[in-house]
């Protein structure tokens, strides 16, 4: 497994922007995909955006057109550019990496989370 460290969260007003970063520790294991999830209080964790290796990114409908995910495979780093933020985007954002272990087994690694708060 790998260690994920997120940064870039904060407080912004509606319509503002934030850029989240997630860096994965160097590992012998291959990372198949990296992405971002979010979880608001009392709600289930949901996918925001994910970018598998060699595949174009996939976005949740709620953020499509506003958020942009970018992955630097060589650096095992993923970014999430969030524009036109809305109050409903308020949540703890978690970085995720799908790690391939020996024998092809895949497990998810998670960051500690970074708070994003969007005020009206």
Image: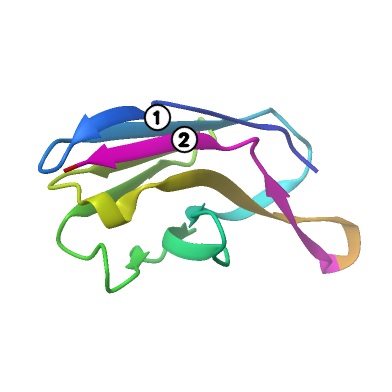
Q: Which residue is drawn at 59% across and 50% down?
A: 96
Quadrant placement of the N terminus: top right
* Residue indicated by mark 2: 115
Disc 1 designates what residue? 9
Query: Is residue 118 magenta-colored?
Result: yes
Magenta-tinted stretch: 104-119
Indicate the secondary structure of the residue bearing disc 1. loop
x and y, in percent, of residue 32 in the image:
61, 57
- Nearest the viewer among 84 and 70 is 84
Q: In which quarter of the image is the C terminus?
A: top left
Using the image, determine if residue 100 lies above or below residue 28.
Answer: below
Viewer can see residue 77: no
Q: Report the predominant secondary structure element of the magenta stretch.
A: strand
Apparent side of residue 75 relative to residue 59 in the rendered image (left or right): right
Give the residue displayed 39% in from the left and 26% down from the top.
8
Indicate left or right for 24 with 35 as reference.
right
Residue in the image at 35% along x and 63% along y: 57
Residue contact between numbered discs 2 and 1, judged by CB atoms under 8 Å: yes
């Amino acid at each position: 497994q790998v260690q994920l460290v997120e940064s870039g969260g904060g407080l912004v007003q509606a319509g503002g922007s934030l850029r989240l970063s997630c860096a994965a520790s160097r590992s012998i294991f291959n990372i198949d995909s990296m992405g971002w999830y979010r979880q608001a209080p009392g709600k289930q964790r949901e996918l925001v955006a994910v970018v598998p290796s060699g595949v174009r990114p996939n976005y949740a409908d709620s953020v499509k057109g506003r958020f942009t995910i970018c992955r630097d495979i060589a650096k095992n780093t993923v970014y999430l550019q969030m524009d036109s933020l809305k109050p409903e985007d308020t949540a703890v954002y978690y970085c995720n990496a799908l790690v391939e272990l020996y024998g092809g087994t895949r497990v998810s690694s998670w960051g500690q989370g970074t708070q994003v708060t969007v005020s009206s």
